[in-house]
């Protein structure tokens, strides 16, 4: 369980986090999104106990991650952006060394299999590729079966297969009840993993909502195959014709889909290759960035701590 109440983080005169509140409940995967410098890493660092909050209240696994660090750490796995490994140790030696730092660690080979590093077990850490290091980071973060996992850009630099593998590991942990907060710039990753998304902008939380709610605030499409734009389409439908399809863009996806089907049924037509597609998270996110004053995301009420 993660609870953040009115968190601020300042570096001198730089206010990186300005009054952020949210909760993450057990087994939930929440993605913290936002452009470079939005305040995501600063938030993560406080939650991980690496940095004191400037003000506000933070609880992780029942304790204050900074003041009760020793207790909280037992329940928390952390993968921040820069890991400090000893380059001369091998992968297996590194995992073995970390196993001593907590109770009931996963067996070494099991964790290496999970992150697909078994074949690199005897390689010195200093010789790993960037993506392999990232996977070793993940191995160490999950080694002590954490209740709460903080992942700061967990798949940056990973090849597509390694990324898929990491996603499966995270999904498996969440299914087993691990609470996960992750930051990512890969919106597809957030869409795949997260039940809920938080968006930060200039230190503030601008959006907090479950994924379907956030996506439904974007512009989706209803489309079907046709050889031209039908002349009897209602004039107020913003329909376009492109690449052999009629495309209707809408922010009321469910209602529009029902209207399109009703329109076809009234004419005894079956629409070929109908696709009802919600906006992707990337489209919603970019809509937010382009049009802060009431773009698609502006319609999403902030739901702090609501799943
Ligand atoms: N140690 C520091 N000292 C001074 N300013 C800092 C420090 N760390 C971060 N900042 C500033 O705080 C703000 C938030 O940075 P932060 O790293 O939290 O953003 P972020 O959302 O994680 O960005 P990114 O996506 O690039 O990782 C930025 O303006 C950054 O320059």
Image (cartoon, grey):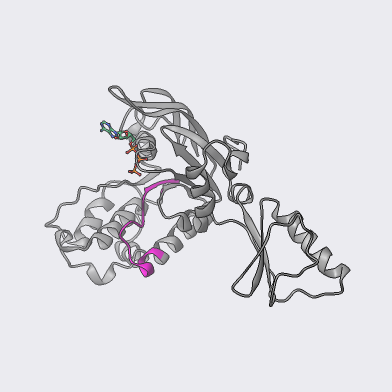
User: Residue 39: percent from the left, percent from the top?
Assistant: 38, 36
Q: Is 70 colored magenta in this rendering?
A: no
Q: Nearer the viewer, residue 186 or 81?
A: 186
Q: Is residue 189 visible?
A: yes
Q: Is 158 colored magenta in this rendering?
A: yes
Q: Is residue 156 above or below residue 305?
A: below
Can you tell which quarter of the image residue 60 is in? top left
Task: Write down which quadrant ligand 1 falls in.
Answer: top left
Residue drawn at 55 percent across, 35 percent down: 293
| Left-right relation of 58 to 131 | right
Q: Quadrant of the C terminus?
A: top right
User: Residue 281: percent from the left, percent from the top?
Assistant: 53, 53
Q: Is residue 298 above or below residue 170?
A: above
User: Residue 124: percent from the left, percent from the top?
Assistant: 15, 62
Q: Nearer the viewer, residue 255 or 112?
A: 255
Q: Residue furthest front?
A: 231
């Amino acid at each position: 369980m993660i609870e953040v109440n009115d968190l601020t983080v300042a570096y001198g005169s730089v206010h990186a986090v300005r009054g952020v509140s949210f909760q993450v409940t057990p087994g939930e995967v929440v993605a913290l999104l936002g452009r470079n410098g939005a305040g995501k890493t600063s938030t993560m660092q406080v939650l991980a106990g690496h940095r004191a909050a400037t003000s506000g209240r933070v609880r992780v696994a029942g304790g204050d991650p900074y003041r009760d660090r020793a207790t909280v750490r037992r329940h928390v796995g952390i993968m921040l952006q820069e890991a400090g490994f000893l380059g001369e140790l091998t992968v297996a030696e590194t995992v073995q060394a970390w196993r001593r730092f907590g109770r009931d660690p996963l067996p070494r080979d099991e964790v290496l299999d999970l992150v697909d590093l078994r074949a690199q077990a005897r390689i010195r850490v200093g010789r790993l590729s960037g993506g392999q290091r990232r996977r070793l980071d993940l191995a160490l973060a999950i080694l002590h079966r954490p209740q709460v996992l903080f992942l700061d850009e967990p798949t940056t630099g990973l090849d597509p297969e390694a990324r898929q593998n990491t996603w499966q590991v995270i999904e498996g942990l969440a299914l087993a009840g691990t609470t996960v907060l992750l930051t990512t710039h890969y919106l597809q990753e957030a869409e795949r993993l997260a039940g809920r998304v938080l968006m930060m902008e200039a230190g503030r939380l601008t959006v907090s909502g479950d994924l379907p709610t956030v996506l439904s605030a974007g512009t989706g499409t209803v489309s079907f195959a046709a050889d031209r734009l039908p002349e009897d389409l209602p004039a107020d439908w913003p329909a376009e014709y492109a690449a052999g399809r009629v495309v209707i863009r809408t922010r009321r996806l469910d209602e529009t889909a029902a209207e399109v089907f009703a329109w076809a049924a009234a004419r005894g037509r079956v629409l070929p290759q109908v696709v009802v597609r919600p906006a992707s998270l990337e489209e919603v996110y970019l809509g937010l960035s382009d049009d802060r004053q009431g773009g698609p995301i502006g319609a999403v009420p902030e739901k702090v701590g609501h799943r």
